[in-house]
Amino acid sequence: MSGYYDDLLWSSIAGIVLGGGILIVLQKYPGEPFDYSSDFDKEEISLNKKTDTEEKVVSVKDVIDDITEESVLEKTQKLQKCLGISDDVIREAVRKTKADSKKGIDIDDGVNIYKAIDYFIYAAFICGMLYFANIMTGGQIYRVFHGIFRREFEALNLPTPR
């Protein structure tokens, strides 16, 4: 039985030392900040339309205003046939998009794939920690949490483990 506790002790020490070392290195060298914004967060997008002397900068609203119902119908003919969508539905979608653009409604819903991946990784890490803690405690993780957070369990009226 002492072999188990020695292994637990050394793995705990190694985890704390490695984790502390990583935190110290990240604190000292934080790296470049990551930009979570998408292209739609910027008011103007350069479309690289060069005129004789300068590069023309066009806003997203200008691009949407230049779209006509007929050009959209022309470009979506194959899709319409595959999905069985009528011309009226496409025209209504173009009108609604233009109206939303004039109102100032943001086209981008704010969800960024990189931000979602970050949250998924954190959630998977926390779930993995709880899973392995439950294995190490013989399925008694609820009891362990009750022992650590006794007042919080009472405040939330959570049942006491048997």
Image (spheres, rainbow, N blue to C red):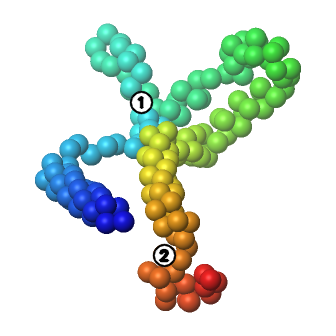
Residue 20: % across, % down:
21, 59
Q: Earlier in the sequence, mark 1 or mark 2?
A: 1
Label disc, if present, on residue 120 of the rendered structure: none
Q: Which residue is mark 2?
A: 144
Say which of 40 and 59 sits in front.
40
Say which of 14 and 56 sits in front.
14
Badge 1 marks a residue whose secondary structure is strand
Residue shown at the point (51%, 80%) measured from the top left: 146
Question: Identity of the amino acid at label 1?
Answer: Ile
Q: Which residue is mark 1?
A: 45
Badge 2 marks a residue whose secondary structure is helix
Say which of 143 and 92 sits in front.
143
Image quadrant for the N terminus?
Answer: bottom left
The answer to whether one can see residue 126 in this image is no
Residue 156: % across, % down:
59, 85
The reply, left or right, for residue 155 in relation to residue 118 is right
Residue shown at the point (34%, 42%) measured from the top left: 35
Q: Please rate how many residues cluster around mark 2, counting C-alpha atoms within 10 Å: few if below 14, some from 14 to 19, many from 20.
A: some
Question: Identity of the amino acid at label 2?
Answer: Val
The answer to whether one can see residue 63 in this image is yes
Q: Could you give the CA–CA distance between mark 1 and mark 2, rounded to whole angstroms?
A: 54 Å
**Residue at the left extreme?**
28
Residue shown at the point (49%, 86%) measured from the top left: 150
Residue shown at the point (58%, 29%) measured from the top left: 64
**Residue at the front extreme?**
1
